[in-house]
């Protein structure tokens, strides 16, 4: 098994001392992939370390701290993160300048104390991103938003109930903090939602399991009042899968009740999105009737064998073929452009069952992109972070090779162009220097368009 300090298991020039050579080789090999995306993908797949000078002062400081909004997205458990477990790192960082002349690039923070990338202050106290001992960009931190400085009447923080990500663009409402796919025979093999719940409770942090509708509305009212610039543009309702009921409600009604309440209280204030299982068409219609505008029935991984191995609960309760049929059916309700399923980019290459070459993995994933895009549906993806408490994280601590991620960006854009599709709605502006989507580089790698959302 490769060590956690080896950022990539198969790539030439990928040892700590040669990481710079690797990213520069890929920049040269794929000049049409933005150089910003090459570095961003490497940070997302392998994490970054923080000097104490770059950590936040939690909710009492001037920097927006990491909220752990659904998964840990870390390469270690809280006890293993050292100072970063006590003084949280920032939610995101923004990269600019440096020897690669980076345009503004927003990156979700995934902590890895052993990463060759480190955020640290120079002698003048100015933060930078360092690789192989060289400063490669300036680093900006997200300011603490005014709405985070206010609490609900019961004392809960807005960050706990309704955190914002993507540099404030998206309100992320994880209203069910655990998943009813439970245990080795049901949990998705790359997902640490249940462990993340357990570790935060063990650390004594507030981490509400089921968020009452009234608390969500109260937190949103605070955001609406103090977000005077209207930076927050969309909300996502999500959480673990529901295979039975919560409070007598099935999955469509459980998540739908929040959408209905939000749309009645704040009509038109935010773009409403729901991440849920691929549900039957009648259930999907309920989401639409409640006011949801965008539906994310995530398909996770394309290959049939890997779906069965990596998503055993979803295979057991729904099945891959039925999952895909339901995604296509949902386009009849929402319109194809507003159905945006996610996949977890990189798990295709996870040992011991995944593809052994980048070429095979990209061919499989592109087959899935072509399937959906040929129906007008534009998937998006999250860059796999191999959390160490998950089965795939334990056996693949270094994730997929960086070359896979760069080739995926190339294939993704090419397939979109083949089918005449443009960037999906609800993700902010596309284009290098403009994108705010922080957990993969797909929006950074798409062309900017005059009629797209502005930053």
Image: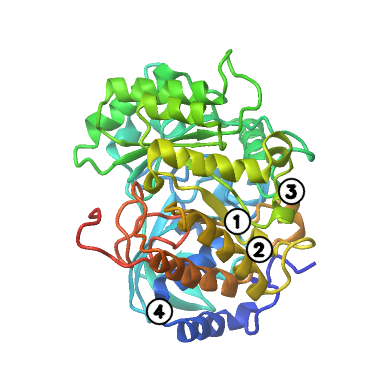
Q: What residue is rendered at 68% in x and 69% in y?
A: 5
Crowd around label 2: few <14 · some 14–19 · many ≥20 (10 Å): many
Q: Secondary structure at mark 1?
A: loop
Q: What is the C-alpha distance between the residues marked 1 and 3?
A: 20 Å
Q: What is the C-alpha distance between the residues marked 4 and 1?
A: 25 Å
Marked residue nearer the N-terminal end (1 or 3): 3
Viewer-nearest of discs 4 and 2: 4
View extreme (top): residue? 248
| Residue at the spot of label 1 | 385
Could you say which quadrant of the image residue 93 lies in?
bottom left
Q: Secondary structure at mark 3?
A: helix
| Residue at the spot of label 4 | 32
Q: Position of residue 401 (x, y in %)?
A: 63, 71
Q: Position of residue 441 (x, y in %)?
A: 44, 63
Residue in front for this viewpoint, 299 or 431: 299
Circles 2 and 3, Cβ within 8 Å, touching? The answer is no
Q: What residue is rendered at 44% in x and 54% in y?
A: 378
Viewer-nearest of discs 4 and 1: 4
Q: Is residue 241 left or right of residue 391?
A: left
| Residue at the spot of label 3 | 308
Marked residue nearer the N-terminal end (3 or 4): 4
Viewer-nearest of discs 3 and 4: 3
Q: What is the C-alpha distance between the residues marked 3 and 4?
A: 35 Å
Viewer-nearest of discs 2 and 3: 3
Q: Which mark is residue 399?
A: 2
Circles 2 and 1, Cβ within 8 Å, touching? The answer is yes
Q: Position of residue 124 (x, y in %)?
A: 34, 69
């Amino acid at each position: 098994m490769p060590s956690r300090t080896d950022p990539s298991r198969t790539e030439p020039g990928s040892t700590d001392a040669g990481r710079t050579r690797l990213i520069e080789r890929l920049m040269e090999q794929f000049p049409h992939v933005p150089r910003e995306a090459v570095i961003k993908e490497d940070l997302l797949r392998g994490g970054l370390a923080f000097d104490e000078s770059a950590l936040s002062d939690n909710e009492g400081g001037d920097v927006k701290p990491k909220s752990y909004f659904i998964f840990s997205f870390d390469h270690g458990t809280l006890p293993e993160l050292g100072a970063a477990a006590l003084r949280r790192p920032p939610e995101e960082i923004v990269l600019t300048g440096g020897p690669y002349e980076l345009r503004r690039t927003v990156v979700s923070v995934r902590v890895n104390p052993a990463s060759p990338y480190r955020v640290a202050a120079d002698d003048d106290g100015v933060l930078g991103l360092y690789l192989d001992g060289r400063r490669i960009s300036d680093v900006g931190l997200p300011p603490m938003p005014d709405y985070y400085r206010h609490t609900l009447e019961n004392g809960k923080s807005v960050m706990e109930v309704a955190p914002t990500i993507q540099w404030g663009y998206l309100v992320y409402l994880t209203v069910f903090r655990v998943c009813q796919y439970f245990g080795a025979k049901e949990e998705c093999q790359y997902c640490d939602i249940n462990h993340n719940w357990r570790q935060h409770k063990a650390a004594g942090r507030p981490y509400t399991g089921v968020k009452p509708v009234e608390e969500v509305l109260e937190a949103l009212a605070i955001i609406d009042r103090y977000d005077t610039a209207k930076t927050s543009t969309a909300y996502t309702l999500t959480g673990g899968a529901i295979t039975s009921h919560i409070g007598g409600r099935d999955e469509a009604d459980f998540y739908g009740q929040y959408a209905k309440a939000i749309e009645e209280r704040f009509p038109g204030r935010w773009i409403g999105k729901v991440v849920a299982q691929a549900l039957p068409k009648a259930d999907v219609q309920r989401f639409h009737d409640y006011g949801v505008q965008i539906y994310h029935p995530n398909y996770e991984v394309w290959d049939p064998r890997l779906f069965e191995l990596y998503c055993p609960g979803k295979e057991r309760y729904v099945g891959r073929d039925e999952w895909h049929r339901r995604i296509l059916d949902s386009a009849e309700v929402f319109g194809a452009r507003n159905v945006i399923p996610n996949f977890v980019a990189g798990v295709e290459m996870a040992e011991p069952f995944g593809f052994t070459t980048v070429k095979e993995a990209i061919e499989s994933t592109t087959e899935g992109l072509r399937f959906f895009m040929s129906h007008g549906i534009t998937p998006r993806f999250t860059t796999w972070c191999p959390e160490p408490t998950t089965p795939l994280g334990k056996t693949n601590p270094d994730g997929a090779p960086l070359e896979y991620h760069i080739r995926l960006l190339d294939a993704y854009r090419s397939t979109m162009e083949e089918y005449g599709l443009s960037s999906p709605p609800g993700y902010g502006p596309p284009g290098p220097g403009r994108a705010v989507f922080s957990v993969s580089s797909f929006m950074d790698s798409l062309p900017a368009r005059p009629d797209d959302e502005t930053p």
